[in-house]
Amino acid sequence: MAVALLVAAGRGERLGADGPKAFVMLAGRPMLEWSLDALRAVAAIERIIVAIPEGFDAPAGTVGVAGGTERSHSVRAALAAAGDGPADQPILVHDAARPLLTPAIVTATLDALARTGADAVVAAAPVVDTIKRVHADAPGLHVEATLQRHALWAVQTPQVFRRDALERALALPDDVLAAATDDAGIVEQTGGRVHLVESPRENLKVTTPVDLRLAALILEERC
Ligand code: CTP
Ligand code: MG
């Protein structure tokens, strides 16, 4: 049986709301409730641990844990609160900032982990924009290269892991974890094999106010 870790302990600075992003009201409910619905609907998930900001309560039917300084620290805290389990237990990590999660996306990632025998499987969508890399230090946003779009995928959550691979990755030094923007990335750094599974672009991340408006429109359309 799988365990799900929902990270919801960020401050949401780029959204700029009054309180933490995961608790901002979205289509009539706190944002994190939307992804919890999708997680609760999947029978293979036996337990849900939520990393929450200080002063907030764990949602009904979940185990709450205080978040850490950076996202990876919150993932580590949530995994610690999940207790022990077999080395090959699937651990799913999801951002509360992706409220458009569906049970189908959750199931697709869990199925792909079992099928491929990979250390991690990540939901991702093909990149639709042409991406140019600029010279980091030169003035004037000087273009260094145009990347081959067909080989580029934008990664999302959920990301699912074999428990032993995620534990090994989260044992990296604190500063390495602090620099990580993606859990699968630290699994790659520790030699793990990571696969992607295609997921709709609609599983967007709420980062700025325009994302919140878009998410509200889609959720209202779904209801
Ligand atoms: N997160 C977390 N603990 C942290 C930082 C982030 O649990 N210390 C969670 C957020 O709650 C969010 C997810 O990680 O669900 C993705 O992070 P992001 O979109 O960056 O959210 P915030 O860090 O809250 O936003 P910002 O970076 O704009 O402050
Ligand atoms: Mg952040």
Image (spheres, helix red, strand yellow):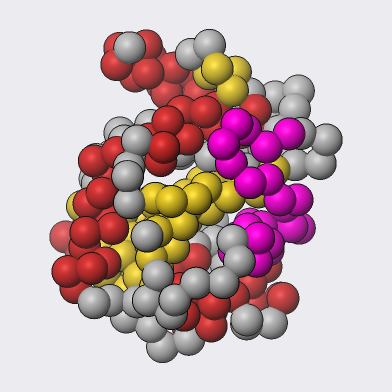
Where is residue 88 shown, x and y percent of the image?
37, 76
Residue interval drawn in magenta: 57-81
- Up the image or down, 166 lies above or below 190; here it is above
Q: Quadrant of residue 116?
A: bottom left
> Which residue sits at x=83%, y=35%?
55
| Position of residue 210 measured from the top left corner of the image (x, y, whole percent) | 49, 24
- The reply to whether residue 104 is in sight is yes
Q: Is residue 187 magenta?
A: no
Relative placement, left or right, of 108 versus 121 is left
Residue with the most extreme bottom position: 191
- For the point 55% across and 32% down, the residue is 32
x%, y% of residue 170?
59, 75
Asked which quadrant contains residue 178, the reply is: bottom right
Question: Is residue 134 depicted above or below 17 in this figure?
Answer: below
**Residue 142 shows in the view:** no
Quarter occupied by the N terminus: bottom left
Depth check: 143 or 51 in front? 51
**Could you tell me which residue is drawn at 50 percent across and 72 percent down?**
85
Report whether 223 appears left or right of 174: left
